Image (tube, rainbow, N blue to C red):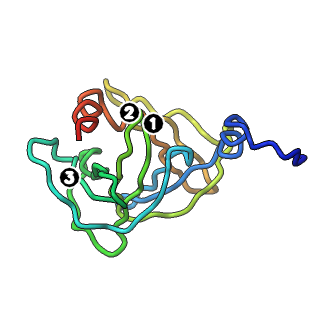
Amino acid sequence: MADNGEPESQDQVEDTQKGKFFTFSLGTEFYGIEIKYVTEIIGLQPITEIPEMPEYIKGIINLRGKIIPLMDVRLRFKKPFREYNDRTCIVVIEIRGITIGLIVDSVSEVISIQDEEIVAPPNLNKEGNKYIKGIGKVGNDVKLLLDSDKLLNDVDVEELGNI
């Protein structure tokens, strides 16, 4: 790409992020989230609990003066709670106009997955896999690719928007 001195357009920035996924683990499963949603990765910090929130919303943190709500992704996916440890991280993402921290067991890497390597998830129950948008084939491994917009439902967006 020739450098004509003009700043990159949003389309060009999104194009460089296309097919790139930030991966993390919950237990033995690996998940991917489109890199365009990820703003930063931080270590676990002291969490202030907020009453009357869903169990998977663990509370809030103060990140450089900005209040960030935290979602424990394990609990969101109805997995058993696991004590946090030195590998536990917070992946800060922005979805639906809200900045939120996702608490994950450990972070992995940023990988590229081409469209032809992504298949639809099997529809094994009535609701379907509401959080999984696709399954990425990476060598002999699979990465469950999240539908970021579905991590928060409308009630969550309303409640978290008021924080």
Q: Which residue is mark 2?
A: 150
Residue 147 is labelled as 1
* Element class at badge 2: helix
Task: Residue at 13% x, 49% y: name it.
Answer: 50
Between marks 1 and 3, how big is the CA–CA gap? 22 Å
Q: Position of residue 45 (x, y in %)?
A: 28, 67
Tell me if label 3 and label 2 are in contact, CB under 8 Å: no
| Horizontal side of residue 12 vs 134, given as left or right | right
Within 10 angstroms of label 1, few (less than 14), some, or many (20 or more) residues? some
Within 10 angstroms of label 3, few (less than 14), some, or many (20 or more) residues? many
Task: Say which of 139 and 73 sits in front.
Answer: 73
* Element class at badge 1: loop
| Horizontal side of residue 27 vs 16, given as left or right | left
The correct choice, above or below, for 10 with respect to 127 in the image is below
At label 3, the amino acid type is Gly
| Horizontal side of residue 115 vs 57, given as left or right | right
Q: Position of residue 162 (x, y in %)?
A: 23, 36
Residue 59 is labelled as 3
- Residue lying farthest to the bottom in this orientation: 86
**Where is residue 76, by image quadrant?**
top left
The correct choice, above or below, for 26 with respect to 53 in the image is below
**Where is residue 104, by image quadrant?**
bottom left
Task: Say which of 50 and 25 sits in front.
Answer: 50
Q: How many marks?
A: 3
Tell me if label 1 and label 2 are in contact, CB under 8 Å: yes
